[in-house]
Image: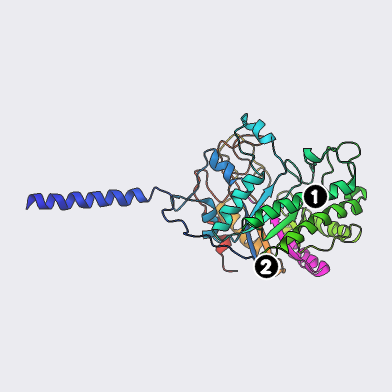
């Protein structure tokens, strides 16, 4: 009898240990087959930019949800995301220099982006692919042409280069069943594209110096490439143009649609970082969204936004946000971040907007490197705490709007 009882106790302890071990591993049962999502025009985009995930994971970053190590794409989907935004650089060879190794993947190059899109689509997440038309970051202050194009002196040659490159990228993706639901032609093109650090004779695409016609020619060439590949695809890709800071949006789209003769696009996109973009108050943003929607008969989306959940740090890389004064009513706390995102989304929906995309909610601190530091300059704005655990604010995407 004693032997029998001892065997029962040992069996019970063995099962308990096995159950405890399960809680420490990654998702044991991934989806058995891909579930592709077809983004519909009437669907509100709950977007997250996950361009850095592959790089962060390669350099020690770990993501957890309910104390489980999990795929960050699955985490985002489970908490309400339906679209992943990913940037594409032309040939970012500088990444190898930063890491000091020829074996380093070209993060945000084509192969890395393909991997990101595959991860998103396998989980049924739609994709917004952002063409930077640069080897590195394109933003309002920097729009440098790719090294491969820097010696171009003919607008026609540049136009053909834009078309062929855009067409080639999308054709390769489409052939693999990975056609994006959205494509951005350029990133934060406030004055133009490929207009900084150019060589003598390079076509002038600076709209701020009245080269709207040339800029429009290039944008239209990219648009045509998207339309031509989309015509061969089951996914009819929507096209967005993207400007930083709400104060610039109406002016820019007025110029590009008239002087630039650009009309064949679907979405007016803007970056809205409230701690930087202060000309138009938070409470006045809905009126602007409604005005843009009505004046241009286009959909309107916030393609980038971010807000801190703390003013603290977890590494020595200086943070972009947190040193500024918070918006009134939105302290740098979990509650403040959550309230900001819920109110921003509510306001966008009520104004007739069709999407809000959060910029790099995945950028936790790791040994990842960029041109300016190691770690993260946004770890206090992510949807994860400094140990990589999900924050409650991530659930603004599941809020009943």
Examine the rendered structure and indicate whether residue 366 appears above or below residue 123.
above
Examine the rendered structure and indicate whether residue 385 appears above or below residue 263.
above
Q: x%, y% of residue 163? A: 80, 52
Q: Residue at x 13, y 49 (%)?
A: 6
**Residue, disc 2:** 349
Nearest the eye: 181 or 310: 181
Discs 1, 2 touching: Cβ within 8 Å? no
- What crowding class fits label 2: few (fewer than 14 Cα within 10 Å), some (14-19), or many (20 or more)? some
Image quarter for residue 89?
Answer: top right
**Residue, disc 1:** 162
Q: x%, y% of residue 338? A: 58, 57
Disc 1 secondary structure class: helix
Give me the disc on residue 308.
Answer: none
Nearest the eye: 256 or 382: 256
Q: Residue furthest top?
A: 100
Image quarter for residue 57?
Answer: top right
Nearest the eye: 65 or 181: 181
In the image, the segment drawn in magenta is 283-307
Nearer the observer, disc 1 or disc 2? Answer: 1
Nearest the eye: 245 or 164: 164
**Mark 1–mark 2 distance (CA, rounded to whole Å):** 34 Å
Image quarter for residue 231?
Answer: bottom right
- What crowding class fits label 1: few (fewer than 14 Cα within 10 Å), some (14-19), or many (20 or more)? many
Q: Report if residue 20 is visible in the image.
A: yes
| Magenta stretch: includes residue 200 | no
Disc 2 secondary structure class: helix
Disc on the earlier residue, 1 or 2: 1
Q: Report if residue 189 is visible in the image.
A: no
Q: x%, y% of residue 247? A: 81, 55
């Amino acid at each position: 009898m004693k032997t029998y009882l001892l065997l029962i106790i040992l069996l019970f302890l063995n099962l308990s240990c096995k159950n405890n071990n399960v809680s420490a591993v990654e998702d044991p049962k991934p989806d058995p087959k891909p579930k592709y999502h077809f983004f519909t025009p009437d669907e509100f985009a709950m977007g997250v930019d996950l361009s850095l995930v592959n790089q962060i994971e390669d350099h020690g970053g770990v993501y957890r949800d309910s104390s489980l190590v999990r795929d960050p794409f699955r985490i985002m989907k489970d908490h309400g995301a339906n679209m992943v935004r990913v940037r594409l650089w032309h040939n970012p060879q500088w990444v190898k220099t930063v890491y000091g190794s020829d074996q380093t993947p070209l993060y945000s190059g084509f192969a890395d982006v393909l991997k990101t899109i595959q991860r998103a689509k396998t989980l049924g997440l739609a994709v917004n692919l952002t063409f930077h038309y640069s080897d590195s970051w394109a933003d309002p202050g920097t729009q440098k042409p790719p090294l491969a194009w820097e010696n171009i002196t003919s607008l026609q040659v540049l136009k053909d280069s834009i078309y062929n490159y855009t067409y080639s990228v999308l054709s390769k993706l489409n052939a693999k069943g990975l056609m994006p639901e959205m494509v951005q032609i350029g990133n934060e093109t406030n004055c133009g594209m490929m207009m900084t650090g150019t060589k003598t004779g390079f076509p002038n695409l600076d709209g701020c110096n009245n080269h709207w016609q040339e800029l429009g020619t290039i944008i239209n060439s990219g648009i045509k490439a998207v339309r031509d590949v989309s015509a061969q695809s089951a996914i009819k890709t929507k096209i967005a143009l993207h400007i930083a800071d709400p104060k610039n949006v109406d002016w820019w789209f007025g110029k590009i649609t008239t002087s630039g003769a650009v009309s064949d696009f679907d979405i007016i996109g803007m970056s809205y970082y409230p701690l930087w973009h202060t000309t138009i108050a938070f409470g006045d943003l809905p009126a602007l969204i409604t005005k843009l929607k009505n004046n241009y008969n286009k959909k309107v989306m916030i393609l980038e936004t971010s807000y801190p959940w703390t003013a603290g740090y977890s590494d020595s890389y200086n943070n972009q946000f947190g040193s500024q004064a918070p918006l009134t009513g939105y302290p740098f706390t979990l509650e403040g971040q959550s309230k900001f995102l819920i109110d921003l989304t509510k306001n966008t929906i009520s104004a007739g907007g069709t999407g809000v995309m959060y910029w790099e909610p995945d950028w936790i601190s790791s040994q990842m490197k960029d041109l300016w530091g190691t770690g993260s300059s946004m770890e206090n704005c992510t949807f994860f705490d400094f140990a990589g655990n999900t924050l409650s604010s991530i659930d603004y995407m599941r809020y009943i709007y």
